[in-house]
Image: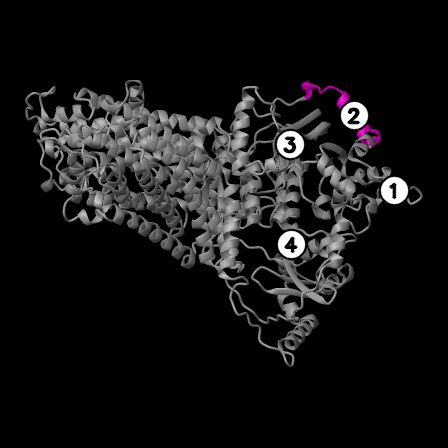
Amino acid sequence: MSMAAGLAGEDLSRQTSSRGSWRSTSVREMWNAPNAFQRSGRQQVTNEEEELKWAAIERLPTYDRMRRGMLRQTMSNGKLVAEEIDMANLGEQEKKRLMDSILRAVEVDNEKFLQKLRARNERVGIDVPKVEVRFEKVSIEGDAYVGSRALPTLLNSSLNMIEGIIGMLKLLPSKKRNVQILQDVSGIILGLDVCADTVVGDDMKRGISGGQRKRVTTGEMLVGPAKAFFMDEISTGLDSSTTFQIVKFMRQMVHILDVTMVISLLQPAPETYDLFDDIILISEGQIVYQGPRENVLEFFQHMGFRCPERKGVADFLQEVTSKKDQEQYWFKKNEPFRYVSVADFAQGFATFHVGQRLVEHLRVPYDKTTAHSAALVKEKYGISSMELFKACFAREWLLMQRNSFVYIFKIVQIGIMATITFTVFFRTEMKPGQLGDSAKYMGALFFSLINVMFNGVAELSMTVFRLPVFFKQRDALFFPGWAFALPIWLTRIPISFMESFIWICLTYYTIGFAPAASRFFKQLMAYFGIHQMALGLFRFIAGLGRSEIRANTIGSFALLIVFVLGGFIVSKNDLEPWMLWSYYISPMMYGQNAIAINEFLDERWSTPVPNAAENTVGKVLLKGRGLFTTETWFWICIGALFGFSILFNLLFVAALTFLDPIVDNKTLIDNDDAENKSKRLSNPEGTDMQVRNQAKKGMVLPFEPLSLAFNHMNYYVDMPPVSNFASIFFDMLTSRNQRRTVVCTIHQPSIDIFEAFDELFLMKRGGRVIYAGPLGDRSHKLVEYFEAIPGVPKIKEGYNPATWMLDVSSAAIEAQNDIDFAEIFANSDLYRRNQELIKELSMPQQGSKDLYFPTQFSQSFLTQCKACFWKQHWSYWRNSQYNAIRFFMTVSVGIIFGIIFWNKGKKMNTQQDIMNLLGAGYGAVLFLGAGNASAVQSVIAVERTVFYRERAAGMYSELPYAFSQVAIETLYVLIQTFAYSLILYGMIGFNWKVDKFLYFYYFIFMCFTYFSMYGMMAVALTPGPQIAAIVMGFFMSFWNLFSGFLVPRTLIPIWWRWYYWGSPIAWTIYGLFASQMGDVKTLVEIPGEKSKPVNQFLKDYLGFEEDFVIPVVFAHVGWVLLFFFLFAYGIKYLNFQRR
């Protein structure tokens, strides 16, 4: 900004030498110029206060004098006021006023601004460093699968992974084909202010336009000290006029500031093409031409090809190397045409004078002594580490303010869950100091642990959502990974503390935990450490996964390991000796030990227990659960929790620093094998002849011609002030007896494409029509209409009419000539002729009938279902990232559970054996089921955006889509469950009976199905996957609390016992254990009680009865149908797309 301020006046400096200092007499001229670039002397200052301020500024040292100045503004009463400003500390409004004064008319002032910037550097003797990029004999190649093996199907992904592993072991050669991208190439290469405060937007939320997104990306590349820019496809989504403006500004930067730019454009308009100095034409990996733009047509004439008069040079260059388009440009009529291959062009360029001159330049070694010491940036980043941190911290704080709803919702969620928790474990129902009442206390502690930890799950989806932008900015060297991660870590600390504090304030004394104040604050410290550890873990998982599907899957797997080995689901005493190491690396174990030690080592749990290994009730309880029994271990666990938090955040930084973004490889190479060649040899006429023959034999469908007329139609939509006018082309295509009307919009049409249309419908910003009529031969009618308007410049010879009409109808031309193109059109003869035609077409012909369709959709409901299911089938089959990972995780989780609970289905001798099996069933259905619900959300979110578009086009109704989505997901769950059930049932060691296995399979299958339906429902009823994840976690906490594992149904207070039947997980656990163990009569040892049969223990302690299995079977069907109907309702009646 200091540079910009220094250029606000013309008479900038009167230095005594080329490297002298700025004289104080020039300071006021620099700031008080009447406009940004008007040449003037010292301005008369009428305000004495302003004169005194200038005098004070002129007495400052040179450095401070250059940073300070006076910025004028006109008040509402018309008074001109000047205020002293410091350029290093300008506010947003001051910056805007300054830039408005410098760049009032961007098209004109931008070049003047750059020229003054260059002149200022020359006055003080600054030589702008230049960069020369040389490349000699560069070759680039890649490996890719060929033909159908390149498709991203579930089978191909699995085969590719297996072949990759075998290939790493050098046991099998790779089946990928080598692709040559570049072959032996050598050479030398010498308007967003209206949406500054508008979010970029996404698939569901409308933000800035596609063209403005492209300009944002281009602006990101131009920011900074870089002197060489390499840009690819910067014009995609922009109209030709905007592309021309952007490239023109870049040309000014190149010529004035001595920067180097290499830009690839897709068929640029002629006026944009003429802005470039040199052209590099690459085809089939070889450079066909590299040199001055003025010589490119000369080279191709040298090779026998000439560009037609009304042909854009860029279009000609793209087609002249094509085998099917080359012949039309052959101009040596006295010689027969022969196809000139890319290799022939490259060889011809080597003998052309431009190519020979390039070779001569490359022969001369580069003289490094001529290089400027400042030509290349020595620092990796443009500012210091502290400034990077400050900038990223400020951005993080802004994003937190924008996402305040998420944090408020989480706090409300914690408050609600805490209230429900203390009503379930109310202190009047909790009796401390006795072994029999310890289960409730342990359940309350464990549920609090789970809730505090799961409250950080939202961090995963929010982090994944931001990673694509981060990776783009990281690779552009905006900032390193630590500068992105550290502000996230620091800004979440106070929120984490507040959430932990709210939870413990609402639950600690209402549940009736140890009353001492020291115990309260130690418990708060433990929960805060657990939450910090969880946030770090989920951030690390997000950075490791880098996509929603991968991160959710990895997250489910990590939570499985952390939870199962945390000390509650399975006791440390029941782990195999060789697995004890895994117990000590589980961060949740330290959280479980910290909160349990803090409670059960209190004085009220110090009642002696006779004939026990430990001397108090509290220590007996801790010992029985495999937990530590000394206060020292509390502080060790607290230290471990914060240590894990630091470790996970450092791993998150490492993932951001060293891992690359996940991109899909979309390259597809044709398999030109012998079989395909034989097919072509057997058909010498080729495919084109076949298509023509089929077209000749095609039939014409009978239909009645229809006319669609609209007159004075108004259409309004809430839009940010961001939107460019659109060109709508009408094209009448005639084929035999049928006439079809095609209406389309096109960005940057070439002359050939533009003049292929018959009529044009052109609107300016605001939706007002400025032309609607025929184009005419060579667009002469369009050109004649606009050239007849006073002040409109004539079209140049060979200029693209599409680009010309946008240029001459711009708002700048209207303001310059004080005209309104819409008013001119409304008073034209063309408009009156259109009105007469509309009136004529609006009158129905004699015998005609009103347009009527018996149904809303062209196909029946059943056909729609079939089509949607077929579409979803291919979508799932090719979504290997989702399904391949799902099946891999299913097998992995099954094996892990099988190892942890190996043969425990045959051990039912003690109460702890039964509880271990209960934990196995609880973990088996919860973690993989919740993983299904979480992973499916990103898939449904993507499919929903496609559904919105296709529903708007009238392709099908909502219910066929919902049925097909549910059907295909259920089919994959069916296969997933079969593999999981076989592994789990066999390794746990349940009794191999057909009915028992079928029950086991059914309940697992229905559990996974309703979890998937639940995840789909959450997306359908919420705006996006981030909110869906929070809502899903909120209700899943209820299910978890009332599942019958943390607190058995018989111990739930009577006022909450009804909700036990409202937890689908409770029904699944009931069905699994009642079907597998409801008929087992083996005696079970119960501490403090007589032994009793297994089935009696299940009935007395857990409330499970074998006779109730059939109702449980039907209840699962009810849960699946409930979530399906809610999903269908959300799809049919809710639309969250705001575009």
Whether the residues at callouts 4 and 1 have beta carbons within 8 Å, the answer is: no
Earlier along the polypeptide chain: callout 4 or callout 3?
A: 3
In this view, the residue in front, 465 or 1035, is 1035
Amino acid type assigned to the residue bearing label 4 in the image: Ile
Instruction: Report crowding for label 3: few under 14, some 14 to 19, many 20 or more residues within 10 A (C-alpha).
Output: some
Q: Please name which of the two marks, 2 or 4, marks the residue nearer to the observer.
A: 4
SS category of the residue bearing label 1: loop
Label 2 to label 1: alpha-carbon separation: 30 Å
Whether the residues at callouts 4 and 3 have beta carbons within 8 Å, the answer is: no
Quadrant hosting residue 131 = top right
Amino acid type assigned to the residue bearing label 3 in the image: Glu
Amino acid type assigned to the residue bearing label 2 in the image: Val
Instruction: Report crowding for label 1: few under 14, some 14 to 19, many 20 or more residues within 10 A (C-alpha).
Output: some
Q: Is residue 547 found inside the magenta-colored segment of the image? A: no
Label 4 to label 3: alpha-carbon separation: 45 Å
In this view, the residue in front, 1054 or 721, is 1054
- Residue under pointer 3: 122
Whether the residues at callouts 3 and 1 have beta carbons within 8 Å, the answer is: no
Looking at the image, residue 194 sits to the left or right of residue 111; the answer is left
Give the numbered dot on residue 337: 1
For the point 30% across and 35% down, the residue is 923
Q: Please name which of the two marks, 2 or 1, marks the residue nearer to the observer.
A: 1
What are the residue bounds of the magenta stretch?
349-370
- Residue under pointer 4: 746
For the point 69% across and 53% down, the residue is 803
Label 4 to label 1: alpha-carbon separation: 35 Å
Instruction: Report crowding for label 2: few under 14, some 14 to 19, many 20 or more residues within 10 A (C-alpha).
Output: some
Amino acid type assigned to the residue bearing label 1 in the image: Phe
